[in-house]
Amino acid sequence: MSLNLSRRQFLAGGLTFTGLCLAGPAWSNTARPSLPIPPLADGTNGEPVDLTIRTGLWSFKPGVMTPTLGISQDYLGPTIRTRRNTELNLNYHNTLSEGVSIHGHGLHVPGNVDGGPQLEMPPGESWQPTLAIVQPAATCWYHSHTHGKTGTQTYRGLAGMIIIDDDEAVSKELPNRYGLDDLPVIIQDRTFDAAGGLVYSIEEAGEDGWFGDTAVINGALSPVAEVPPGKVRLRILNGANARFYILAFADNRTFHKIASDGGLLEAPVPMTTMEMSPGERCEIIVDLSEDTSAELLTFFEDDIDEEGEGIISGLVGLVTGPGQSAAPASLLLKVDRTLVAHRAPVPERLTTIERPDASEIRKTREFVLEMDHGDGESTHAGHTGGHGTHAGHGAMSMTINGAVMDMSVINERVERGVWERWRIRSDQGAHPFHVHGCSFLVEQMEGAAVTPDQAGWKDTVVLDDDDWSEIVVRFDHLASEDFPYMYHCHILEHEDQGMMGQFTVTDTTG
């Protein structure tokens, strides 16, 4: 999809639901499950956090048990809490019958503990990385990064959230009572067969990746969370394999975005709608001081037409219309006034971001993401929302700068501590581009100026075939030829099909 305006420009222009009956979706009078809150694993004290990769059974739908994968639980993993200037010790054990690597997405750590595909744990084996946490407070995550199997393993449940705290963030008096007024919100889309099993096939994925037809939040269908009155913080992760989401509250209320992938924004950004690409994280605060409830809706962005003119009707159709292409996720925040409220105001300033001068940028690199159809023809899954078809799939390759991912090839060599400019675009469609081992600053997105909500530290940037996206980045940790970092499209099917490259970081590039 390519809008005449960039997606973020269009949404920032003030999409509203005025006059539309969006507050009463069809499920409002049915029983809703409680929002599952992943258990909190304390990694702040240096003690090892044990993480068992295993099979499980999870009830997405009432009375139906679905075979899944999980990390120390049946589906997804615990939320790992750590702190700046401490060591995080993890102890992974793989009990599956296949190899698994687990990547710490968003963590600033050396390549030998980054969890890329070179660090695959064979069945029955363990991996015990020690991570020196030196970066600012942020919401990160961990997920499968197994070569050729990232899509299917993540889809089946191998993912979880990581929360990094620091003194600066704590001093801002933001909501931070985990599971009460500080909620993890992992949004995914899944397709189920008649028996309730998960449906997934990379061979049957559309060229835009695998689109599930049902949205789930923390593994639940349209859950409800009991929250105190006052300010509530949502740490939202787009954990989808391929879908871009649009988020908005059913009553069109304003919320404040306070953080992106790499941590706090310089100032809160008031918003009524928000786009999220696969792999992206956003922290928002919603004020429930005067309300009894608020309903956060998630829409599938591929239901918007190419000019953006169908966005309103598309959203209305998803919520109220029969036969809609996909079921939107809804998280109902229900106020319990017996709970102690967080009353502190949202700070006017959150942090200071130091940006490099142009004179400090020593090198420019360009990356073009390409989908080569060969002799085959493809059919988009499109807004039908299903798993689609891909005629001639075997003839299609996913490349960056003409190269398919090769574990034996180092594509780029980077010098540690040096600012660089990376210019990235695609030859077809939108792609979320993720870089390991760092956070970066976006200077241009899809040829357009960066909106305030994207002006913070990021590790995922959206690009398309209209114009270049540009980032400035510096790598402060080493990544060797044996354990390089990765850059790749975070549409997991594209990654698995070769849209990924490897790079080293050394003290010299000679």
Image: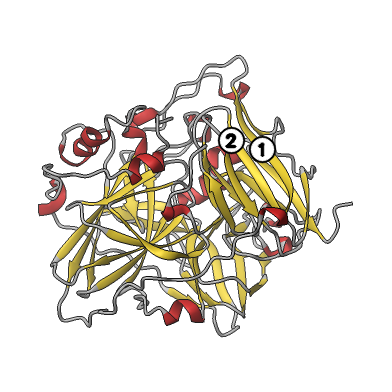
The image's colour scheme reads secondary structure
Identify residue for label 1: 367
N-term mark: 1 or 2: 1
The spot of residue 197 in percent (x, y) is 37, 45
Examine the rendering and report whether any part of residue 62 can be seen. Answer: no
Disc 1 + disc 2, Cβ < 8 Å:
yes
Residue 342 relative to residue 238: left or right:
left
Callout 2 secondary element: strand
Examine the rendering and report whether any part of residue 467 can be seen. Answer: yes
The N terminus, quarter of image: top left
Tell me which corner region of the image, top left, top right, bottom left or bottom right, holds residue 285.
Answer: bottom left
Q: Closer to the camera, 184 or 358?
A: 358
**Up/down of 86 relative to 64, above or below:** below
Residue 133 relative to residue 491: left or right:
right
Please report the residue visible at 71 percent of the width from the left and 64 percent of the height from the top: 476
For label 1, the crowd category at 10 Å Cα-Cα, with few meaning under 14, some 14 to 19 and many 20 or more, is some
Identify residue for label 2: 425
For label 2, the crowd category at 10 Å Cα-Cα, with few meaning under 14, some 14 to 19 and many 20 or more, is many
Residue 290 relative to residue 382: left or right:
left
Please report the residue visible at 61 percent of the width from the left and 72 percent of the height from the top: 90
Name the amino acid type tagged 1: Phe
The spot of residue 176 in percent (x, y) is 37, 77
C-alpha gap between disc 1 and disc 2 = 7 Å
Please report the residue visible at 64 percent of the width from the left and 55 percent of the height from the top: 436
The spot of residue 76 in percent (x, y) is 45, 60
Looking at this rendering, what residue extends furthest in the bottom direction?
45
Name the amino acid type tagged 2: Arg
